[in-house]
Amino acid sequence: MKDLLISIAKGLVEDPSAVDVTVDAPDEEGVVVYHLHVSENDMGRVIGKQGRIAKAIRTVMRAAATRSDEKISVEID
């Protein structure tokens, strides 16, 4: 899952070396939180107009997690 998020983000940004993902341990409900970090100049590219790209990233990640019976959340920091 982490590799999928990294590959999606690297395809969107101008500085792929600044892409970093940290993963939190599952909480009491079993939800794993993925924190996506990109350079400040690329934040607009990852979030998109009115958050559409960020919503699409979350949708793809949630669909991939469902296939492996996981519950995830993606935070863009």
Image: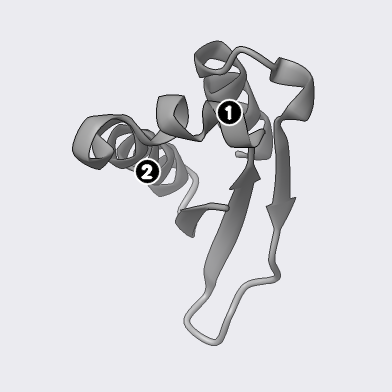
Q: CA distance from mark 2 to mark 1?
A: 21 Å
Which labelled disc corresponds to residue 58? 2
Q: Which residue is mark 1?
A: 41
> Secondary structure beneath disc 1?
helix
Q: What residue is shown at x 54% (from left), y 87% (from top)?
A: 28
Q: Residue furthest right?
A: 17
Q: Relative to 32, does residue 30 appear above or below in the rendering?
A: below
**Quadrant in the picture for residue 39:** top right
Tell which of 57 and 15 is nearer to you. Answer: 15
Say how many tags the image has: 2
Residue 12 in picture, x, y percent from top left:
50, 16
Within 10 angstroms of label 1, few (less than 14), some, or many (20 or more) residues? few
In front of the other: label 2 or label 1? 1
Residue 74 in picture, x, y percent from top left:
48, 52
> Secondary structure beneath disc 2?
helix
- Please state if 61 lies on the left or on the right of 53 as rendered: right
Tell which of 62 and 37 is nearer to you. Answer: 37
What amino acid does circle 2 point to?
Arg
Residue 27 in picture, x, y percent from top left:
58, 80
Q: What residue is shown at x 55% (from left), y 27% (from top)?
A: 42
- Please state if 15 lies on the left or on the right of 9 as rendered: right
